[in-house]
């Protein structure tokens, strides 16, 4: 297995590639192995500076990350492929999908979660602010447990990762207006304070394929609930491949 990918669970028919949020890691997706069917292999992208890549330097450019990720995907089996990305991971999944299709590869479906469209930027600069301001922002989103910041050793480990990832997403700019051909689903927690439903629906503009919006109970990190509704939706959309050819 390539160092940029972690196998969450094996599968025999299709594969789902997951892209983590800012400050996250591939291990976030390990519980998903208990919620998806046996035929779906799940891989999680591991960016440098965390997990098994802890010794590597952090990156602050999502375009560079996408270039590296798409290269690692070439090592996977040739079978129906799906991308899922949350928050920063949604933008990285999109950039990787563009490169994937440019290589002549087929993407069955792109799942975008909790992120504004790629031509829109939050205009924030938390990566430049104090540790306390960045911690307060991350804590308000609910993605990182408060005890992580309470422990000095963990805090020293996590802060550089958060700062690098926030720089990557806050300075990201779409380089061109190439579009995808695969279907896209935009997913959002109904109490998300980072992106509105009308904003996330503008992801429809990035594809010539079908587009669908789906809301779920919860805030920006509705995924933490690991709700039956969410996984059932994901499984249903993935299994559609078995019933039709896009």
Image (spheres, rainbow, N blue to C red):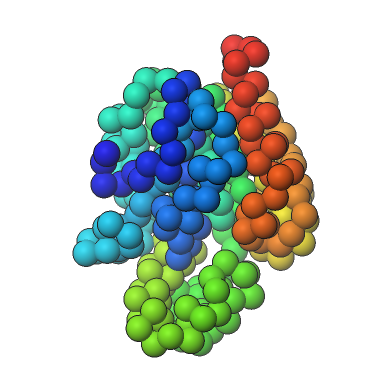
Q: Is residue 67 visible?
A: no
* Position of 153 relative to 202 (above/below): below
* Residue drawn 65% across the image and 29% down it: 237
- Residue 194 is left or right of residue 175, and the answer is right
Q: Nearer the viewer, residue 103 or 220?
A: 220
How many marks can you see? 0
225 up-or-down from 73: above or below: below
* Residue 114 rendering spot, x and y as whole percentages: 63, 53
Direction left: furthest residue: 55
Quadrant containing the C terminus in the rendered view: top right
Question: Image point 43% across, 70% down: which residue?
Answer: 162
Q: Looking at the picture, does residue 206 appear above or below residue 246? A: below
Q: Is residue 127 above or below residue 44?
A: below
At 45% across and 65% down in the image, what residue appears? 23
Quadrant position of residue 161? bottom left
Asked which quadrant contains residue 124, the reply is bottom right
Image spot of residue 82 (x, y percent): 51, 31
Q: Nearer the viewer, residue 208 or 135?
A: 135
- Percent position (x, y) of residue 62? 39, 52
Answer whether residue 103 is visible to the viewer in this image. yes
Q: In this view, does 83 lie to the left or right of 112?
A: left
Residue 205 image point, x, y percent? 64, 36
Locate the N terminus by quadrant. Answer: top left
């Amino acid at each position: 297995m390539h160092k940029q990918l972690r196998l969450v669970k094996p599968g025999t028919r299709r594969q789902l590639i997951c892209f983590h949020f800012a400050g996250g890691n591939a291990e976030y997706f390990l519980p998903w192995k208990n919620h998806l069917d046996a035929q779906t292999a799940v891989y999680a992208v591991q960016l440098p500076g965390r997990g098994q890549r802890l010794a590597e330097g952090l990156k602050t450019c999502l375009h560079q990350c996408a270039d590296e990720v798409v290269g690692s995907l070439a090592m996977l089996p040739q079978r129906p492929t799906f991308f899922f990305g949350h928050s920063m991971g949604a933008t990285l999944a999109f950039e990787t999908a563009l490169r994937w299709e440019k290589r002549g590869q087929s993407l069955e479906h792109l799942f975008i979660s909790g992120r504004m469209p790629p031509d829109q930027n939050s205009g924030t600069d938390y990566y430049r602010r104090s540790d306390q301001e960045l911690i307060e922002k991350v804590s308000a989103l609910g993605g990182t447990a408060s005890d992580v910041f309470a422990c000095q050793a963990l805090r020293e480990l996590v802060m550089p990762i958060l700062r690098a990832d926030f720089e990557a997403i806050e300075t990201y700019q779409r380089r061109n207006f190439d579009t995808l051909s695969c279907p896209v689903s935009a997913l959002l927690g109904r109490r998300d304070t980072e992106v509105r439903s009308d904003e996330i629906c503008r992801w429809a503009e990035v594809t010539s394929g079908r587009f669908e919006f789906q809301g779920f109970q919860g805030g920006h990190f509705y995924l933490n609930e690991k709700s039956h509704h969410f996984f059932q939706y994901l499984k249903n959309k993935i299994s559609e491949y078995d019933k039709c050819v896009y």
